[in-house]
Image (tube, rainbow, N blue to C red):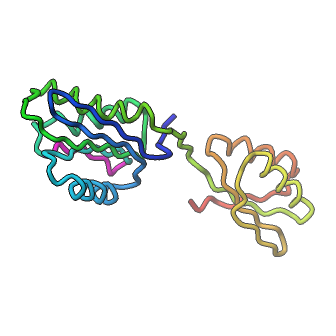
Amino acid sequence: MPQTLAAPAHSELIIKKSRFIGCVQPMADRASAQAVVDALWKQHPGAAHVCWALLAGGQSAAVDDGEPSGTAGRPMLDVLRHQDLEGVLATVVRYFGGVKLGAGGLVRAYTDTVAHALLTAPKVILQRMKTLECHVPYALEGMLRREVEAAGAQLVDVQHGSLVTLQMQLPEAQAAAFVQRINDQGQGRVGWLPASA
């Protein structure tokens, strides 16, 4: 099940006199990631490279920033994928120590820096949510509210008209069973509205 990070986590490795400063953090999109990378350049003006990888749906990216092609961004992205993460930015700031590491050494250095940061990163499970909307007679409102609470769903909106219209959100995996339970208890008096989202 995909996860994201609850908060940023950091690491630092010294490999053959080069300093690798890593960070993994929750990130929604590429524009936000670019802003973080720009800020890192301001914080580390003497750095040789600021390489990064973003795993965020269709906005994913892998940037080598001057390192040999495929030795930094792609390996960092692979670490995020291997951990089944989504909505996460990994950055590594490198201060060159004067000793070349070679392609294999660079891949290991960037991979290890991200992996070390992820060891301490607090992870949370990502759940796809589903919005449900129904209308019920006033007599069923209490029952429906109790079921929403028992299911751990969130009541988003309630409107009172000739019927009570309730909108709720719950994890997608629980939606079908929830609808079936409400239909059974409502004995045909629950009307479900088409999903708007």
Q: Is residue 190 above or below residue 8?
A: below
Q: Using residue 160 as the reference point, say whether residue 9 is left or right of it.
A: left
Which one is in front, 15 or 104?
A: 15
Q: In this view, does 24 lie above or below 137?
A: above
Q: Residue at left 77%, top 59%?
A: 191
Residue 114 falls in which quadrant of the image?
top left
- List x then y, in percent, for residue 76: 28, 36
- Residue 197, percent from left and from top: 56, 59
Residue 155 quadrant = bottom right
Please tell me which residue is depicted at 93% across the width and 62% down the height of the picture. 139
108 over 55 or under it: above or below: above
- Residue ID at (22%, 58%): 42
Q: Position of residue 73 (x, y in %)?
A: 22, 39
Residue 150 colored in magenta in the image? no
Along the horizontal axis of the image, is 192 left or right of 197? right
Residue closest to the eye, 136 or 58: 58
Nearest the viewer among 23 and 148 is: 23
Q: In this view, does 123 lie above or below 26?
A: above
**Count of labels shown?**
0
Please indicate whether residue 113 sits to the left or right of residue 17 in the image: right
Q: Position of residue 54 (x, y in %)?
A: 32, 46
Q: What stretch is highlighted in magenta?
A: 57-65
